Image (cartoon, coloured by chain):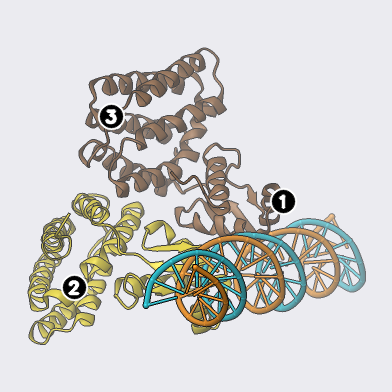
Chain colours: A yellow, B brown, C cyan, D orange
Amino acid sequence: MQDDKSIVEIIQDEILRRICFLETPPGTQLKEAELAGEFNVSRTPVRDAISRISHLGLVETRNGVGSVVMALSPEAIRQVYAMRLELAPLIGTMSPRTITDEHRRLCDELLEAALVLHGAFDPGRYIEINHRLHGLIADLIGNQSLRAFWWQTYYQAASTWHRLGHALGAEVAEALVSELREVGRALDSGDVAAIGHIQRVHIGYGFARIERHILTGP
Amino acid sequence: MQDDKSIVEIIQDEILRRICFLETPPGTQLKEAELAGEFNVSRTPVRDAISRISHLGLVETRNGVGSVVMALSPEAIRQVYAMRLELAPLIGTMSPRTITDEHRRLCDELLEAALVLHGAFDPGRYIEINHRLHGLIADLIGNQSLRAFWWQTYYQAASTWHRLGHALGAEVAEALVSELREVGRALDSGDVAAIGHIQRVHIGYGFARIERHILTGP
DNA sequence: GACGGTCAATCTGTATGCAGCTTAGCTGGT
DNA sequence: ACCAGCTAAGCTGCATACAGATTGACCGTC
């Protein structure tokens, strides 16, 4: 395997990670020169990285002003979640990949971490566990088109959804533990389709929480 | 409305158009300097445009070699079509937009053009009619996430699918006429959901043709 | 004190130069 | 005739310089 991710891809991934980890919350300015200094490159690859993720709508670049991290509008969030609710059940139906021991092991590890989280909540840890769980599930998607869309909607939803970690604390930790337990059971059964439907269910719960605590109002 | 599409977006759209119109068929080299001269800009915005569409897998850029238009692998084509078959029925269910007289008028215009095509087939015209029909249908999709995916899979499928125009001629013209007649009827009924299912059906037919004439073999 | 205008700081958009990589074609030896 | 090696041309990747846009602060005036 060629792990030669270009410098642009590395920067792109890092910017997306920071956005959905809320390290650069909506409103933050992404200054090309600053990021360039951080990665010890010129502005060119940084510009390229920002440009590549522009289609997600998470960053808006205006001439003379800068690139600012955007919060998706409530309507956009609803549409993204509506899409995720439809995509989730497809995970198991569109040429799923086979479950390996590595998947099972990672799930156990995440469950353990989530249990710790339930005792002593930490927003950063919450996000990280969610992120790794998403990676685990995406790895079971065999259809590359679906996998790409699954990632895209994840990034679009993440920054809003992860704010719940800060707002609700233990409540979401408990939900995460439940989700991981259910996913673990499905992995034991070798049933990828079940995982898709589990995702469907929990995305629904997550969206309900967002509607209640964040999108309240118009 | 702000029609201030940036130079980069204009070039990006044009490159994609040329790819799915088969003006730059798979194997063609996209030379940055050449395109730069054509658009009277420097290599920078051209580079940006090519970089932005790299995630579609239609162009592969290698250092020291160039950017070459790629034909998706048979397996990738199958996966893209599998995805489109799932997305099509969602067109009518996910907050569809309302049908206007303009939609109806455009459909009639396209049907007329398709009938002419049936008499005297021309691959370029076939592609153009398909392209405009796609635009018409995408315009009925209210969910912006679904609309984005619909376009992405369209671009990915187009260059393979449009080769049928060259290979089969009148057969696909007849299919296009049928499709436009059915879409027209659905538009008359104001039934966007019906259009989604019509798409589902005809994408299935199109995929079967591709399997038969292009993906034959491994 | 409040307001309008101007200027400077700062950021993105674009052009250009250079280094590194790849490959086609030539050349010399066998 | 064939093959290995080399060279030069051409392309992308990155750095840098400059032009254009925007904003906030400062200053003068009413």
Q: Chain of mark 1?
A: B
Q: Which residue is mark 3?
A: B195
Q: Is residue A125 left or right of residue A25?
A: left
- Mark 3 → mark 2, Cα distance in angstroms: 42 Å
Marks 2 and 3: in contact by CB < 8 Å?
A: no
In the image, what residue occupies the spot 66% across and 56% down?
A: B32
Q: Secondary structure at mark 3?
A: helix
Return the disc, 3 or 1, that comes first in the chain's sequence: 1
Given residues B186 and B25, the one toward you in this image is B186
Q: Is residue A111 left or right of residue B115?
A: left
Q: Chain of mark 2?
A: A
**Residue A46 pos. (x, y %):** 51, 72
**Residue A197 pos. (x, y %):** 13, 55
Q: Which residue is mark 1?
A: B37
Q: Is residue A106 above or below residue B160?
A: below
Say what amino acid the circle numbered 1 marks.
Answer: Gly
Closer to the eye: label 3 or 1: 1
Q: Which residue is mark 2?
A: A104
